[in-house]
Image (cartoon, grey):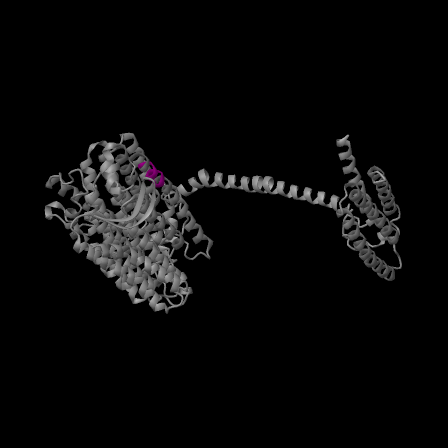
C-alpha cells in the first residue's frame, strides 16, 4: 500500500472533527446538520477502506458500500422530512422543534 | 361404638357447615330443623355410646399433627367423665336450640346464628372428647371463637361488639397459660396424650408439676371466669339469651373445670396447686355471690351467680372431690339453663326490659314460666331435696373433710356464699314475680308506653323449660348421698376419685347437710323479710335513689373493671397511642414521606436537563464521547 495507514487514520480523524464541528456549530440549520453527519460517516468509511487495504481483506470495502447505500436512503428520507418541516413551520432551525419536551417541568 | 363416638362430634359440625353454606337457600323452617336435629342426633349418638359403654375407649379417627416425635392425631377418648359431660351438653344444648328457634323468630340473621351455635357445641364436644392436649386446645379455642361471635352477635351496637372482644381477649390471657402448659408437658414428658400424661405424672419433679398446675389453673381461670379473670362474663350478657344460656350452662365456662378434672391425676400431685385451685374457687364463689346481691339487671344477676357456682366447682376440684364437682357441674347446667331460658321468656314478654325493679306480678301473667323459674331458683339457692342442694352439699362436705385451717376457712366461706346465694336468688324471684304489676313507681311506666303490656311468647320457649325444671329438681336422684344408697354417677365416676370421699360418718354428714339446709332456708327467709310482701314496694321506692357505699362497690363488681382499666387498659391505650402517632405516623410514615419528597425533587432536577433542544443534546453527547475517549487515551498512555 502506497499511503500508510497512519495517514489515512489522521485524515479520517480530521474529517470526523470537521463534521462534528459542523454539527455542533451550525445547529440552526437542519440541512447543515445533515451535511455534518454525512461528513462524519465518510470519515468512518475512510477508516473501513484503509483497514481493508492494510490487511488485504474485502470486508471493509463491502461495509463501505453498505454505508453508501444506507446514507443515500437516509438522506433522501431526511430531506423529505426537512421539506415537510419547513412547510409546517417555515423554519429549519432544529431547536424550534421541541414538542416532545415536558412542558410542565417546574423550574 | 366407634360410629356413635364419631357422630357425637361430627353431627353438630355438619349442621354448622350446612347452615353456613346452604342456610340462606333452603327455607327457614328447614334450616332451623336441621340445626336442632343435629344436636338431638348427637344426643342420640351419646346415648348409644352410653349403652355400649363398658370402660374407657380410645379411638383414632385420623392423623393430624405429626412431626418428628410429636404426634397429635385426631383421637377421641371416652371415659365416664366425658360420657356424662357429652350427655349433658348434647341434651341441654338441644333444648337451648329448640328454645332459640322461638327466641330468634324475628331475627333475620338466623343462618349465622345457628351455624355458630352448632359450631359452638361441636367445639365443646371436641374439647370434652379430645384424647390429646392439642386437640383439646383446638376445641378450647373453637369455643372461645364461637363465644366471641355469639356475644357480639348484634354487632351493630358497639357495646355488644366490645363485650365480645372483651370476652375474647380476657379468655385469651388464660389460653396463653394453657398453651404454655401444653408445650411444657411435651418438652418434659415427650407426649401430649392425656391418658399417658396422667400416668407419667410421678416421674416429674414436684416443681414442674406445680408450674404446670398453675399454668393450667390460669387457663381455667380465663375460660371459667374465675378470680381474677372473671370480668368478661357479666359483659357477655350482651349476646342473645340462648347464647348466654349455652355459654353459662352447658359449654364454655365449664371447660376450665373440665380441664382441671381431666388433668387432676397430674396436677393433683402438687399440694400447692390443689390449694391454689381451692382458694381460687372459694374466692370466686364469694365474689360472684356478693356482686349478685345488688345487681339490677336480671341477666347480670344470673351471670354473677354463674361465676359463683363455677367457683364451687373449682373449689370441689381443689379438694379432690371430682365426683361432687362433676355432679354440681351437671346439676348447674340444668338449673342455670333453666334460669336463663326462663329469664329469656320474662325479658321477651316484657319487651326486652331487663331491670328487675321494673318487673312485677309475673306469677299471674306467666304462670308456666314462673313455676319453672321457681324450680331453678330453688336449685340455685340449694333448698333441701332439690338437685342443687345435694350437689352443693357434696362439695361442701368434701371441703369440710379436708380439715385443717385452710379447709375450715374455705368451708366457712362456702357456707357464707350459700347464704348469700339463697338471698340473691329469692330477691330476684320476689322482685320479678311478686307484687302486682301496677305496684311501684317504675313498674308499669315503660310497659304502658309501649301499649300492649305483654308480648305473647312462642309456646316452644315455655315447653323447653319443663324438662329442665324436672331434671333440676330431681337431679339429686342421679347421685344420692351414700346413706341413701349410692347414686349411679358416683359409681360411674369412681375411677376418678383418688382420695376416699366417703370417709365421713353418717352423723357428721347429716349434720353438715342439716347445716347447709338451714343456711339456705335462712337465706330465703332473709330475702322474704327484705323483699317479700308489703316491703317490696318500699324497696322499689328505694331503688330510685342512687346507690352508695357498699352497694355501689358491689354493683360495680368490686370495681375490678375500673381497676383493670387503670392498671392495664389505660397504659396499653397510652402505649398504643404513642406507637401509633409517635412511632408509626411520626417516625415511619414521616421518613417515607421525606424520602419520597427527596426523590421527587431529584427527579425534577434531572428532568429539567431535558430541555428539548437538539443542539444541546448533540453538544452533551459529543462532550461525553470526548470525555470517554480522553479517559481511554489517558489510560493507554
Q: Is B205 located above or below residue B115 in the figure?
A: above
Look at the image and tell me in which quarter the N terminus of chain B lies. bottom left
Q: Position of residue B488 (x, y in %)?
A: 14, 50
Q: Is residue A101 left or right of residue B257?
A: right
Main SS, magenta residues:
helix
Of B49 and A22, which appears nearest the observer?
A: A22
Look at the image and tell me in which quarter the C terminus of chain B lies. top right
Q: Is residue A15 left or right of residue B582?
A: right
Q: Is residue B549 magenta?
A: no
Q: Which residues are magenta?
A: B178-185
Q: Position of residue B25 (x, y in %)?
A: 40, 68
Of B225 and A33, which appears nearest the observer?
A: A33
Of B162 and B17, which appears nearest the observer?
A: B17
Q: Position of residue B331 (x, y in %)?
A: 23, 51
Residue B283: quarter of image: top left
Q: Residue furthest bottom?
A: B27
Q: Position of residue B626 (x, y in %)?
A: 80, 39
Residue in view at x 23 percent, y 52 percent: B379
Residue A39 shows in the view = yes
Of B86 and B415, which appears nearest the observer?
A: B86
Q: Is residue B181 magenta?
A: yes
So how many labels did they put on this image?
0
Q: Is B36 located above or below residue B127 in the figure?
A: below
Residue B334 shows in the view = no
Amino acid at each position: 500500500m502506497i499511503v500508510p495507514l497512519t495517514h489515512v487514520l489522521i485524515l479520517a480523524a480530521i474529517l470526523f472533527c470537521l463534521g462534528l464541528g459542523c454539527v455542533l456549530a451550525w445547529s440552526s440549520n437542519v440541512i447543515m446538520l445533515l451535511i455534518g453527519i454525512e461528513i462524519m460517516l465518510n470519515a468512518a468509511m475512510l477508516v473501513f477502506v484503509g483497514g481493508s487495504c492494510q490487511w488485504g481483506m474485502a470486508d471493509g470495502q463491502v461495509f463501505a458500500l453498505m454505508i453508501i447505500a444506507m446514507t443515500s436512503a437516509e438522506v433522501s428520507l431526511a430531506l423529505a422530512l426537512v421539506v415537510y418541516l419547513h412547510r409546517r413551520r417555515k423554519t429549519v432551525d432544529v431547536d424550534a422543534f421541541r414538542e416532545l419536551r415536558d412542558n410542565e417541568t417546574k423550574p | 361404638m366407634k360410629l356413635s363416638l364419631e357422630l357425637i362430634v361430627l353431627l353438630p359440625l355438619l349442621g354448622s357447615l350446612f347452615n353456613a353454606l346452604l342456610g340462606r337457600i333452603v327455607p327457614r323452617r328447614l334450616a332451623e330443623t336441621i340445626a336442632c336435629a343435629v344436636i338431638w342426633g348427637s344426643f342420640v349418638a351419646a346415648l348409644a355410646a352410653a349403652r355400649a359403654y363398658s370402660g374407657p375407649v380410645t379411638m383414632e379417627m385420623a392423623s393430624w399433627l405429626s412431626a418428628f416425635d410429636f404426634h397429635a392425631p385426631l383421637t377421641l377418648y371416652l371415659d365416664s367423665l366425658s360420657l356424662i359431660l357429652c350427655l349433658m351438653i348434647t341434651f341441654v344444648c338441644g333444648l337451648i336450640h329448640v328454645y332459640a328457634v322461638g327466641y330468634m323468630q324475628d331475627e333475620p340473621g338466623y343462618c349465622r346464628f345457628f351455624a355458630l351455635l352448632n359450631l359452638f357445641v361441636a367445639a365443646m364436644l371436641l374439647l370434652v372428647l379430645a384424647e390429646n392436649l392439642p386437640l383439646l386446645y383446638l376445641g378450647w379455642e373453637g369455643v372461645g371463637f364461637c363465644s366471641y361471635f355469639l356475644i357480639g352477635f348484634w354487632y351493630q351496637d358497639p357495646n355488644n361488639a366490645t363485650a365480645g372482644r372483651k370476652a375474647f381477649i380476657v379468655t385469651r390471657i388464660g389460653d396463653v397459660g394453657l398453651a404454655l402448659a401444653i408445650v411444657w408437658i411435651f418438652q418434659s414428658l415427650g407426649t401430649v396424650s392425656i391418658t399417658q400424661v396422667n400416668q407419667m405424672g410421678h416421674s416429674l419433679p414436684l416443681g414442674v408439676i406445680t408450674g404446670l398446675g398453675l399454668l393450667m389453673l390460669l387457663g381455667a381461670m380465663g375460660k371459667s371466669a374465675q378470680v381474677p379473670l372473671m370480668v368478661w362474663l357479666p359483659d357477655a350478657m350482651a349476646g342473645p339469651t340462648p347464647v348466654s344460656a349455652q355459654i353459662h350452662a352447658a359449654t364454655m365456662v365449664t371447660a376450665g373445670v373440665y380441664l382441671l378434672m381431666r388433668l387432676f391425676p397430674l396436677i393433683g400431685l402438687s399440694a400447692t396447686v390443689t390449694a391454689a385451685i381451692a382458694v381460687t374457687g372459694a374466692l370466686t364463689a364469694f365474689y360472684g355471690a356478693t356482686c349478685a346481691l345488688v345487681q339490677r339487671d336480671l341477666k347480670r344477676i344470673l351471670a354473677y351467680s354463674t361465676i359463683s357456682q363455677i367457683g364451687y366447682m373449682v373449689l370441689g376440684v381443689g379438694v379432690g372431690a371430682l365426683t361432687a364437682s362433676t355432679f354440681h357441674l351437671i346439676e348447674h347446667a340444668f338449673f342455670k339453663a333453666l334460669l336463663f331460658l326462663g329469664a329469656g321468656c320474662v325479658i321477651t314478654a316484657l319487651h326486652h326490659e331487663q331491670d328487675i325493679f321494673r318487673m312485677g306480678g309475673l306469677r299471674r301473667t306467666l304462670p308456666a314460666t314462673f313455676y319453672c323459674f321457681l324450680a331453678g331458683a330453688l336449685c340455685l339457692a340449694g333448698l333441701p331435696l332439690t338437685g342443687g342442694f345435694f350437689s352443693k352439699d357434696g362439695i361442701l362436705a368434701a371441703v369440710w373433710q379436708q380439715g385443717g385451717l385452710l379447709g375450715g376457712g374455705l368451708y366457712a366461706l362456702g357456707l357464707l356464699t350459700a347464704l348469700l346465694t339463697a338471698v340473691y336468688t329469692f330477691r330476684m324471684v320476689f322482685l320479678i314475680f311478686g307484687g302486682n304489676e301496677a305496684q311501684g313507681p317504675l313498674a308499669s311506666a315503660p310497659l304502658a308506653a309501649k301499649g300492649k303490656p305483654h308480648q305473647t311468647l312462642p309456646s316452644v320457649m315455655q315447653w323447653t323449660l319443663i324438662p329442665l325444671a324436672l331434671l333440676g329438681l330431681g337431679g339429686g336422684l342421679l347421685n344420692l348421698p351414700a346413706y341413701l344408697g349410692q347414686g349411679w354417677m358416683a359409681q360411674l365416676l369412681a375411677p376418678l376419685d383418688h382420695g376416699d370421699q366417703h370417709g365421713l360418718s353418717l352423723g357428721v354428714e347429716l349434720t353438715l347437710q342439716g347445716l347447709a339446709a338451714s343456711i339456705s332456708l335462712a337465706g330465703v327467709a332473709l330475702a322474704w323479710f327484705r323483699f317479700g310482701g308489703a316491703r317490696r314496694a318500699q324497696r322499689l321506692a328505694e331503688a330510685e335513689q342512687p346507690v352508695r357505699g357498699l352497694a355501689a362497690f358491689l354493683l360495680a363488681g368490686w370495681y375490678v373493671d375500673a381497676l383493670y382499666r387503670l392498671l392495664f387498659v389505660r397504659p396499653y391505650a397510652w402505649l398504643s397511642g404513642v406507637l401509633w402517632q409517635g412511632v408509626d405516623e411520626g417516625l415511619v410514615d414521616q421518613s417515607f414521606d421525606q424520602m419520597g419528597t427527596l426523590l421527587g425533587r431529584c427527579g425534577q432536577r434531572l428532568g429539567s436537563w431535558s430541555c428539548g433542544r437538539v443542539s444541546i443534546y448533540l453538544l452533551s453527547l459529543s462532550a461525553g464521547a470526548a470525555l470517554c475517549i480522553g479517559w481511554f487515551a489517558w489510560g493507554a498512555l
